[in-house]
Amino acid sequence: MSTIDSITLIAESLKRQGIEYVFGIIGIPIVELSMAMQAAGLKYIGMRNEQSACYAAQAIGYLTKKPGVCLVVPGPGLLHCTGGMANAQVNCWPLIVIAGSTFQDHEGIGGFQEYPQVDAVRIYCKYAVRPPTVASIPSHIEKAVRSATYGRPGVSYLDFPGNVLKASIQTDAIIENYTHPNPPLCFPNGEDVRKASKLLKLAKRPLVIIGKGSAYARAEHSIRQLIQRTNFPILPTPMGKGVVPDDCDQSVKNARTLALQKADVILLLGARLNWILHFGRPPRYAADVKVIQVDICPEELHNSIRGAVGIQSDILPFTDQLLKEMGNYRMDMKSDWWKVLKQKCDINSRTVNEMAISTSVPLNYYSVFHHVQEIIPKDAIIVSEGANTMDIGRSMLNNVLPRHRLDAGTFGTMGVGPGFAIAAALYCRDNFPQKRVICVEGDSAFGFSGLEVETMYRYKLPVVIIIVNNSGIYSGLDADTYKDIRSDGDLTQNTPPSALTVETRYDAILGMFGDSGYFVRTITELRQSLNDALKIKDRPTILNVIIGPMSERKQQSFNWLTESKL
Ligand code: ADP
Ligand code: MG
């Protein structure tokens, strides 16, 4: 009679369910499990902080539509991971988290790293379980993967006590299990599609908003066809960028505020009316705007405002059916609506252009991004985080391909950048070896997970990290003011909470590997070092770009958030 170790059973079950990547940090009791995973042919990437491991695993889920696994130790290891789990759940990205837990005969008497783990993470998950027997492990792994990927994607958690990880079982005792088919496509109700097409045809000022649900749905081909055929103006959300190329004629991303405010009919494809879209409410939208909302999750329909039509559907079949319903309809690009939008786009581009072409030192955000955009490959995956760095970078750095932008997302999480970049670089290594990953970080954002450059180095991942360094959170201080303010008194009283050490040499971190990065103050240095950095193919590199500590963004008509009225 043959037997199998539970660690081998776990590893082989994951492999069988299509899992390819595991990100984690080992320790008791999961050391052997990590090795069993490698033996089963899973790719294991050892990270430096569980949060980053969890960010990397969820980015793989978004990029490949197959969840990555995050493997962590009990107690603190899993709790470090919860920030990442919440981020994945809020972003609707598939993810599997596996943690070891204390030996069951130590439960209740203060076992090592003992914690009520399944209960503690349940609110971050669609499915959380400690498989009750070794025999049921494969079926719970199947269920975990299915729960993470079917319907609205999200997080599954599997808990394995130390004694379970040490057990073995006779193979014929394993409970019957299987692999599930790909998630079912959810088709729209035909009547609703006709209603939607009627509204769109009658609209005077239509607008299509493309969210990251469209990107996840792999609906780019149909959406591009729809837009080219109808000439509807489009506005992507941050991670909806690239589903339709940013540089296409129909993009009105440079007239975002006006487009949202004046549209009379909005087709919302895989985006929630949350803070990113100002809740769909006045003053950012017309009070009588008619929203046609398409989402895979029915509970999301009519959230925040009552839509004109709420359609539960996968974006792909909906778009295909809408294309048919629209027939020969085509918007005139010389219509009043298009004229107003184009005019606004032109005005905004001109305002930005003045700052963008400036070469004065210290540099400003716009001048840095203008040259970065000129130099980086058009098909690069752009990872971005930070406050101004991410916001301004979003408008200045184009995406022409879907799922090529990863950022702080719906949860606004800082610290995601390096983990996302590691996942993206592995994804490129294994699928598109020529494609580059550019990780654009604010100096504050970089601080959260910066040491993951060691992980990049160990796995030879050629991520180009550009740190836009204004020596602070939001804004910093210049060297003289920084020194003056702190010259006497208590540093905890006189150092502004927003300040970081002036002109910190983040590039010097690479000295850990006997390497060096680039310290950049001028446009010439920026262009030269970025061109050089792109030639490096076997390790990460850092451009530490010093900008004015008070470098500002252009005047906005609204605060970045529509403030609460409470
Ligand atoms: P964004 O950040 O781009 O505004 P959100 O994360 O707020 O986007 O919204 C994405 C929406 O897309 C979620 O409500 C999710 O349920 C939905 N979604 C995810 N996958 C699909 C799909 N395949 N088809 C339709 N909707 C989807
Ligand atoms: Mg900063």
Image (cartoon, rainbow, N blue to C red):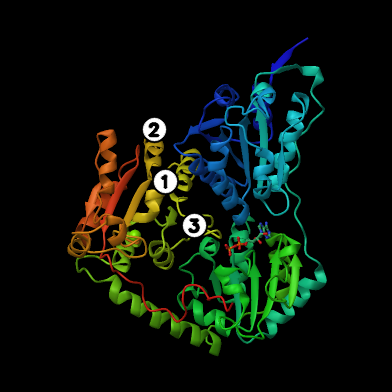
Asked if residue 259 can be seen in this view, the reply is yes
Find the residue positioned furthest to the top: 1
Outermost residue toward the front? 489
Left or right placement of residue 334 versus residue 201 in this view: left
Residue 555 vertical placement versus 126 (above, below): below
**Of tags 2 and 3, which is closer to the observer?**
3
Residue under numbered circle 3: 408
1 or 2: tag closer to the N-terminus: 1
Amino acid type indicated by mark 3: Ala
> Which of pointers 1 and 3 lies earlier in the amino acid sequence?
3
Work out how far the residue at label 2 is from the one at label 3, CA to CA, in angstroms: 25 Å
> In this rendering, is residue 9 above or below 91?
above
Mark 2 and mark 3 lie on one chain; the one further toward the N terminus is 3
Give the x, y percent position of residue 48.
44, 37
Label 1, label 3: how far apart the Cα atoms are? 13 Å
User: Where does label 2 land, which residue?
Assistant: 458
Q: Is mark 2 within 8 Å of ligand 2?
A: no
Q: Disc 1 marks which residue?
A: 449
Comparing 360 with 378, the one in front is 360
Q: Position of residue 288 (x, y in %)?
A: 67, 86
Circle 1 or circle 3, nearest the eye: 1
Q: Secondary structure at mark 3?
A: loop
